[in-house]
Image (spheres, rainbow, N blue to C red):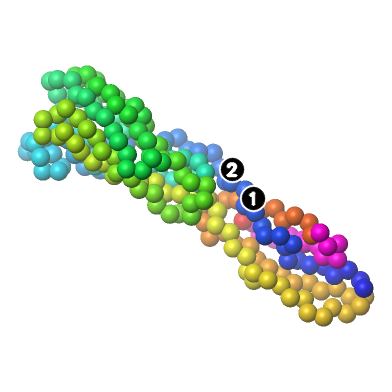
Amino acid sequence: PTPARLTSPAAAPTAAPSSASTPPAPRITSTSPAAIVDAASTDGRGADGATAGPIDLPRAIDLGAGDCGGMAQAMVTVTNSGTSDVAIAFASSDPAFTVSPASVTILVGTSTTFTVTAQVPATAIAGAPLTATLTATTDIPGHTTETVTATATTRGAQLGVSPPALNFGNVGLGTSADLSFVVSNTGNGPASLAIPASANPDFAVTFGTGGV
C-alpha cells in the first residue's frame, strides 16, 4: 500500500514552560489597600477599628502573576513612625508563601522592606488564584497579631486538542488521506509545542498555520 499522510499527532503534544522573563516584583505601599496598623489615621483608629499603631501594614498584598513552576513576588515597605522600636514576625498559612525577613525589629524612624514570595506549583491550572494568610506578630499594644491576605495568579499555557482522535477509515491503494486537528491555548501564557515523529513510517505529521 502507498503511505498515507497523517496530520494527527502520533503522541500527545507537550508544552514547554513559558520562556517569558519574570517581571520585577511590584512595590506595595500601605495607602492602597488600606492599612491595618495605620500611624496616619486621622481619627486615631486603624482600618480594623482598633487604635492606630506606629507602623503601616497593608491589609492585602497582590503578588501578581507567576509562571507555573516559577514564583510571584511583591515587596512591601513598612515604616516605623512611632516613638519606640517595633518587633514584628510573620508566619504563613501556606508554606508556598514566604516573607523575608521573617522577623525583624524596625527602629524608630526607619523602614524595612519585606519580600513576599509565592512558589507556583508546576501542576497548577493557569489563571487559578493562590491565597495565603500571613499572620504578623508584633509587640505593639493592642496589635499583638494582625493578618494580611496574600494572593497570586498562576500563569501558563493550557493546551487542548480537538478532535481528540482521528479515524481515516478506508484509504485506497495508491492514494493518501489527510485529516486535521487543532491545538488551542486557553491559558494566560505562551508555550512552545513539539510533536514527536510517528514510530509508524506510514504516517506523517505536518504543522499548519497559527501559533500557540
Viewer-proximal residue, 101 or 73?
Answer: 101
Horizontal side, residue 82 vs residue 193: left or right: left
Residue 44 shows in this picture: yes
Q: Which residues are magenta?
A: 199-211
Q: Measured from the top left, where is residue 160 in percent x and y?
A: 59, 63
Q: Quadrant of residue 201?
A: bottom right
Q: Residue drawn at (41%, 41%), measured in percent from left and top?
A: 96
Asked if residue 153 is positioned above or below residue 41 in the image, the reply reads: below
Horizontal side, residue 56 vs residue 152: left or right: left
**What quarter of the picture does the N terminus occupy?**
bottom right
Amino acid marked by disc 1:
Ser
* Label of residue 192 in the image: 1
Element under disc 1: loop
Q: Residues within 10 Å of mark 2 (few under 14, many from 20)?
A: few
Asked if residue 201 is positioned above or below residue 28 in the image, the reply reads: below
* Label of residue 66 in the image: none
Viewer-proximal residue, 208 or 102?
Answer: 102
Horizontal side, residue 14 vs residue 31: left or right: right
* Label of residue 19 in the image: 2
Q: Residue drawn at (26%, 30%), measured in percent from left and top?
A: 89
Q: Measured from the top left, where is residue 199 in percent x and y?
A: 81, 59
Amino acid marked by disc 2:
Ser
Considering only order in the chain, which callout, 2 or 1, is on the residue closer to the N terminus?
A: 2
